[in-house]
Image: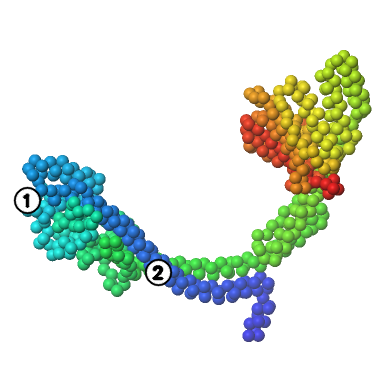
Amino acid sequence: MKRILHFYLNLKYKNKLIFTCVLVGLIPLILLGVFCYYQTISLLLGREKTALSLAAGTAYSSLDYQVQTYENLISYLAHSETIVKVPSTDYQSIMQKFDILTYEYDVLIKDISTQHPEISQITVYADRADLCHGSQLRPLSDLEQESWYGSLSEAATPIWHLDQEGYICLFQRIPTPYIEYVTSYSSHILCIRLRPSHFFDVLTGIASDYHLSVVGGGESFYEYTDDSIAGKSYPHGDWATESSQPLSNGWIVTLEKPFLLLAAPANKMIGIIFLITLACMFLIYMVSNYLSEFFAQKVHLLLSTMQQVEKGNLSTQLRDDCPDEMGQLTNSFQHMIRELDRLVVEDYKNKIILKETQLMALQAQINPHFLYNCLSQINSKALLNHQMEISQMAQLLSTFYRTTLNKGKSETLVVNEIKNVKAYIDIQRILNDNVFDVAYQIDEKLPEQEIPNLLLQPLVENAIVHGILPNKKRHGNLFLTVSSVNGLIHFTVMDNGIGIAPEKIPLLTQTQSAGYGLKNVHERLQLTYGGDHGLKINSILNESTMITFTIPVDDGAAK
């Protein structure tokens, strides 16, 4: 034992891994192979027996449906007025007899035979010697010589028999006419002869390699042997047999299959298991040989990546699909690199967006007093000359630019933001000859808190310029809703314009447009309030567009 241990410890690391993996893998592999051998045989035999049982159940269901169909048919015919009348009528003349048999009875028989081509013959056996009409109407004496006639004359339900020509015969006693409130049967009998090839056609193909038989009342009504086993000799005791429960008429369907054929799939699996075992032994050796190099390469690759990150290279990619500790360490390190790179890039983008916003705000502040003075002068001149529309436009422009520039601040009160967008809407209505109407639904108790400047105006501009104005077919409508619900201020801008194609909606918040577009508003909202507070755009092409966003209510403003 010591020599073996000494030999093992002195092996190279690669050979030590190979020896360990082969030894550890070989023992359970042999045990697994033996277990699979016996378990596979048991499972496959059980599966084949289950399949045989299911086939017997299928045969039972199909055949029982056939039986009930024809029992219902013969019951219907036996109680039909025509069938009851034929053997029971006291014919007054030959013409009366001819008319009933030719124009009523024959027509009924022909109609039923046409609807059911599997019916070979329909015959009424009358307890009258004077009645005979071809094969459709025969005297009862034709049946009285049969050995089973005694049971038929006493039964009130349909009786099945197999005649000498191999046809399946279904008999039913005909009720006595003119007796009300109680069912009474006469001695007359109705018979339907069925072709076995059609009747038992539902049993074709329910299984493979099988022998099937249908037995009832001491008679064998049907037998079938699959071509694959026909003419071959199998030991009688080596057959698996499955019988169905009795059908509604007492028949029993029996399926038989040789055990030798049941075990054929298991014999194939035994060879497959043996080949798999040999392949696994070879794989164990190959994998063991590969692992020694594999682990060394993984450690070297991880070390090399760490050195690259140490030098500032965050674009390196490293992945290990193995779920062991080494794989978790590698993937955790790669996740750390991605997070570090994401934070660096996000911080860089946020700084760029902030600088761009500040720059745009600075550009908007260029000499605002000069603009206000000009607009004030225009308003005064317009009032002196009674130009009320010009005066209104000057006042709206003054309000719009005062709230837009906001003294260079990047934040404004909610009420000032609403004033800004209202002034912009009125300006657009004047410029476009009131081609659209506007409806406001503004909460009167909005919190007095500051929000980023110019959030609504770009949304309204987009609705008017790209939604309402291009729509020449109908009068435009613009809806602006601002409400405070459950700690959130909800903003909604909706128009009945031309709408937006579904494939273009995701691009609106990703593509930079000229001016202060939707992408800018979307990014400012997410930058200020988090990723859940960006723009949400819903549109129906050629009908409407709705843009919504929410802002959390500041605790101080809410109070």
Residue 333 found in image quarter = bottom right
Q: Nearer the viewer, mark 1 or mark 2?
A: 1
Secondary structure beneath dot 1 equals loop
Q: Is residue 212 above or below residue 505?
A: below
How many residues crowd mark 1 within 10 Å: few (<14), some (14–19), many (20+)?
A: few
Residue 170 at x, y = what percent?
Answer: 21, 57
Q: In this view, does 490 lie to the left or right of 46?
A: right
How many residues crowd mark 2 within 10 Å: few (<14), some (14–19), many (20+)?
A: some
- Tally of numbered tags: 2
Q: Distance between the residues labelled 1 and 2?
A: 64 Å
Q: In this view, does 492 lie above or below 470?
A: below
Q: Is residue 270 above or below residue 387?
A: below
Disc number for residue 45:
2
Residue 313 at x, y = what percent?
Answer: 79, 52
Residue found 12% across the figure and 62% down from its top:
146
Q: Is residue 217 above or below residue 456?
A: below
- Look at mark 1 in the image and give the residue it sits on: 130
| Residue that lies at the very extreme toward the top in this rendered image | 385
Residue sitting nearer the eye, 415 or 220: 415
Residue found 37% across the figure and 62% down from its top:
54
Q: Can residue 201 be seen in this view?
A: no
